[in-house]
Image: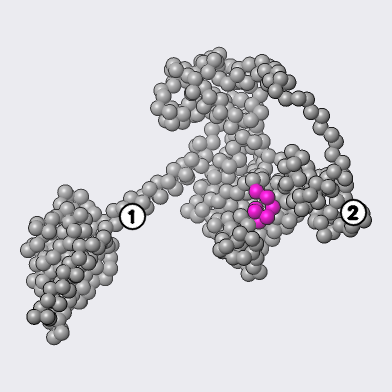
Amino acid sequence: MQNQTHEIWNLRFLNQIMNSMADGVFTMDDKGIITSWNPSMERISGYSAAEALGKTCEILGCSRCFGKECPNGILSCGILERGTSETKECQILHKSGQDIAIIKNASVVRDENNAIIGIVETVTDLTELKKTKHKAEQATLRLGEIHQMANIIGKSHEMQKVYTAIKAAAASGATILIQGDSGTGKELVAGAIHYQSDRKDGPLVTVNCSALSESLLESELFGHVKGAYTGAVSNRIGRFEEADGGTIFLDEIGELSPYIQVKLLRVLQEREIERVGESKKRKIDIRVIAATHQDLYQLVTDGIFREDLYYRLKVFPIQLPRLQSRKEDIPLLIDHFIDIMNGKTGKQIEGISNSALRILMDCPWKGNVRELVNAIEHAFVLCNGKQINASDLPVEIRNPERYISDIRQSSEITQRPRRRNKLTKEQLMSLLNQCDWNKSEVGRQLNLSHTSIWQYMKKWDIPLKRELTSKAEYPNNNNVNP
């Protein structure tokens, strides 16, 4: 009696396990008749337990059973002879008629005398996984489409030269230096090069070199090991390692400090990195594309940027033209951005009036294509008709003289005039000491860029690190190369 109670309890426990499983599970006897069918099988197949019990596995219409077309039944599929089936991806036919992607596995169950008493099969639904994979593939495809050359708009002679350069760069593995003013589309060109190269299936990793301080940028680029510095609570791979097998795009390369310049030079020469806090060398397979809006050669002449690094980066240079020098492309760009904004906003704006177009053609476009995009977005907010009119454009574009006058008047009313004192060596040294020699913090307090701080330090022969200074005077070291 006790054994019978124990068996009943075990059976209930087994049923609870089957009913709680996310995977589909069903059992068959030695004739292939379904004897149990858990709730997940009902969800995956569409057949209720009442519909499945007493039927054979042919109800599933499995697309693959040991290489044979199903339905065949267990007598011909080979499970009884083999004792188990390999775990495999296949499809079953849902009750509604649609194919369901699954992973299927089957095993024969034997008693203590090695006699077959049944078969148990598990079915894993891959529908959600397939959807997720499809979404990821579509996202990658859309990203690639965004960076196609077809989305770099322009038919001018200047842009034709850019297209030719992109094609040549994509066909090679050379390091690329993209130069051009802010808003000319340097990141878009970098993406076009990557997605047309043989590295297109690898990652494209973008790093803005001006957004982080020297220590944070070092960790961001090279990664760090646990305990490398305060706050490094775990190992972290850097962006160079993330880009392995693909491309890394280093934007605003002219903002790199001398220390990071040396480390980048080693990456370009050796194609290997060391994480912060460890001495282990790690090989990486990357393609480097750098960009800057600054005159990098002038930075070399001024001693701010390393000459050897400059020539390592400038293997294949691409110069992007300003929008002002290719005004014949402005109507094409306007039509392109109107199409994009129609899709984003749901509006049906058909074009732009002649008066508005004339204003846009006459604009100097100091912000280049990015400024034009902002102007169209501004116009979409105000436009209620089928055409963008002059009154829909930003005031600084349609009436720049009035805009500047209003800004000046507002500034005079709300702010007291301040006279900016000329920075002295003593003031700079004082701030460097106050900020623990953090040149980024000094720059923020003086409202100057990293580059300007380095220029002043070079001008006054101030060494880059505190430990190089003496207590009495600061050495006049002409060999310092900031």
Q: Is residue 202 left or right of residue 41?
A: right
Identify residue for label 2: 474
Residue located 62% across and 65% down the image: 227
Q: Indicate the position of residue 116 as horizontal and vertical percent values.
A: 13, 78
Looking at the rendering, which quadrant does residue 89 occupy? bottom left
Dot 2 falls on a residue whose secondary structure is loop
Nearest the camera: 420 or 41? 420
Is mark 2 in CB contact (under 8 Å) with mark 1?
no
Which amino acid, mark 1?
Leu
Q: Is residue 216 magenta?
A: yes
Q: CA distance from mark 2 to mark 1?
A: 64 Å
Residue located 55% across and 20% down the image: 393
Confirm whether residue 466 shows in the render. yes
Looking at the rendering, which quadrant does residue 263 occupy? bottom right
Nearest the camera: 187 or 382? 382
In the rendering, which numbered label is found on residue 351?
none
Dot 1 alpha-carbon crowd within 10 angstroms: few under 14, some 14 to 19, many 20 or more: few
Dot 1 falls on a residue whose secondary structure is helix
Residue located 71% across and 46% down the image: 254
Nearest the camera: 409 or 413? 413
Give the magenta range. 212-218
Residue located 54% across and 48% down the image: 194
Q: Main secondary structure of the magenta part?
A: helix
Which amino acid, mark 2?
Tyr
Instruction: Return the residue found at the far front.
Output: 2
Q: Is residue 339 left or right of residue 273?
A: left
Q: Indicate the position of residue 241 as horizontal and vertical percent values.
A: 57, 59
